[in-house]
């Protein structure tokens, strides 16, 4: 009697990879995902290059200067000087709008020169030419406030967009499979927790891919525009941001999948995922409004949901000790493990329950 060999069931690791591969493949075949990613990358590259060239090509205040007043503007930065022969020519350029003002020698003036303007005093020029005493700062701010703001904006918006985009995608995928009963077929072939792990891993791979591409774009853009000093300051902060984002995203992805499993319709996703969305938005607003507040940034760097933004920002500013990112990462990793365990329990207990929204207490106690 002949015997036939039955196919063996895939192992847990194989099941996880099959689900992850399915998630990655479905995204890479999506035109909307490809187009949105391309727009994001091109926009980031254009912003970096535009900012660099704008900084290099920025010109000063345009002024006309007569020969008998040139000594008063020598060494003054922030001026775009046009040499003229006499006062009459200077007045013509001011009247025509070719320059904002003119510096003209005048022996009757106590300073030896006068400033000609069209309809209003040129405040910027007056401040540049003013005689002011030197100022010594006891606690100087080593980072340009504008650069600090844009770095905070960059970290905040990348975390917000990536986490909300892929978190929402995971939630929609879970509810769609549950609503169409496809999940019943899936869990007949792979364990429930393997299904959850595959979804989390697949979307994490895609999210990290976007983060690494954006980091490469930032490096290339800063290098092309000659902003090597800024690149050196940002290098370690970007690397730590990628590490923190990896653990932070896994934490959020597990919670998004668990929250989505508690409902059975696409219309109800918001009722369970809104708290998670608020947790994603909070670090963005905090780092924007409090990027110059060391206390708020320190607290953010140790709270798991905001650490991926707060700690890299403190590293860029030079406010964190060498051991702080390690401690913060350990806290984030421990929280990530706890979130995965809780999320897996909710996901497993809610996935096959149809109809009304599953209450959190029921999902945890089932």
Image: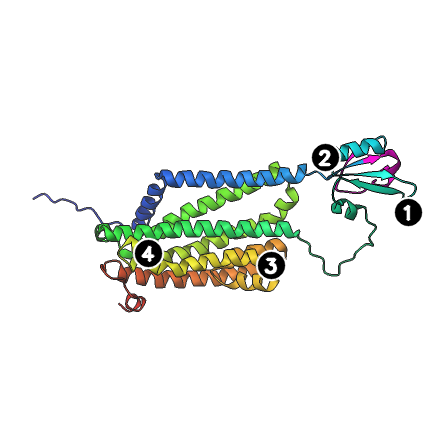
Instruction: Please provide percent x and percent y for residue 76.
Output: 80, 43
Residue 152 seen: yes
Q: Which residue is mark 1?
A: 110
Task: Indicate which disc, 1 or 2, sits on the residue closer to the N terminus.
Answer: 2
Q: CA distance from mark 3 to mark 2?
A: 54 Å
Q: Quadrant of residue 27?
A: top left
Residue pointed to by mark 2: 97
Looking at the rendered image, the quarter that the N terminus falls into is top left
Mark 3 or mark 1, earlier in chain: 1
Work out whether mark 3 precedes mark 2 in sequence or the reverse, and give the earlier one. Answer: 2
Measure the C-alpha gap from mark 3 to mark 4. Answer: 41 Å
**Which badge, 3 or 4, comes first in the chain's sequence?**
4
The span shown in magenta is 65-82
Q: Residue at x 32, y 66 (%)?
A: 360
Q: Residues within 10 Å of mark 2 (few under 14, many from 20)?
A: few
Secondary structure type for disc 4 = helix
Work out which residue is located at the far left of the displayed protein and give it. Answer: 1
Q: Which residue is mark 3?
A: 322
Give the mark nearest the N terminus, 2 or 4.
2
> Marks 2 and 3: in contact by CB < 8 Å?
no
Mark 1 or mark 4, which has the lower sequence index? 1
The answer to if 78 sits in the magenta stretch is: yes
The CA distance from mark 2 to mark 4 is 59 Å
Q: Is residue 124 above or below residue 280?
A: above
On whether residue 274 falls in the magenta region, the answer is no
């Amino acid at each position: 009697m002949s015997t036939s060999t039955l196919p063996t069931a895939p192992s847990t690791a194989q099941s996880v990879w099959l689900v992850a591969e399915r998630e990655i493949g479905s995204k890479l075949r999506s035109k909307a995902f490809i187009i949105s990613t391309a727009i994001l990358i091109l926009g980031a590259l254009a912003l970096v290059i535009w900012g660099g060239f704008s900084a290099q090509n920025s010109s000063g205040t345009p002024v006309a200067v007569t020969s008998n007043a040139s000594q008063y503007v020598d060494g003054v930065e922030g001026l775009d000087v046009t040499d003229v022969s006499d006062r009459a020519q200077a007045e013509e350029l001011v009247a025509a709008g070719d320059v904002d003002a003119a510096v003209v020698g005048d022996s009757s003036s106590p300073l030896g020169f006068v400033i000609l303007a069209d309809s209003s005093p040129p405040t910027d020029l007056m401040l540049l030419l003013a005689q002011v005493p030197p100022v010594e700062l006891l606690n100087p701010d080593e980072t340009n406030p504008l650069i600090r703001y844009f770095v905070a904006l960059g970290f905040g918006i990348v975390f917000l967009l990536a986490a909300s985009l892929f978190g929402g995608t995971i939630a929609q995928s879970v509810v769609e499979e549950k609503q169409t009963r496809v999940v019943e077929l899936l869990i007949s072939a792979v364990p429930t927790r393997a299904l959850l792990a595959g979804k989390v891993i697949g979307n994490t791979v895609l999210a990290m891919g976007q983060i690494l591409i954006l980091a490469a774009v930032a490096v290339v853009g800063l290098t092309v525009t000659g902003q090597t000093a800024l690149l050196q300051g940002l290098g370690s902060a970007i690397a730590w941001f990628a590490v923190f984002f990896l653990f932070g995203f896994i934490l959020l992805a597990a919670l998004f999948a668990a929250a989505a499993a508690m409902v059975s319709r696409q219309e109800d996703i918001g009722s369970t995922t809104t708290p998670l969305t608020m947790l994603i938005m909070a670090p963005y607003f905090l780092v924007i409004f409090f990027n110059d507040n060391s206390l708020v940034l320190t607290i953010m760097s140790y709270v798991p949901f905001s650490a991926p933004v707060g700690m890299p920002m403190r590293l860029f500013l030079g406010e964190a000790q060498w051991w702080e990112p390690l401690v913060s990462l350990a806290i984030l990793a421990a929280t990530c493990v706890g979130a995965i365990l809780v999320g897996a329990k909710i996901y497993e207990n809610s996935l096959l329950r149809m109809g009304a929204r599953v209450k959190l207490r029921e999902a945890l106690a089932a």
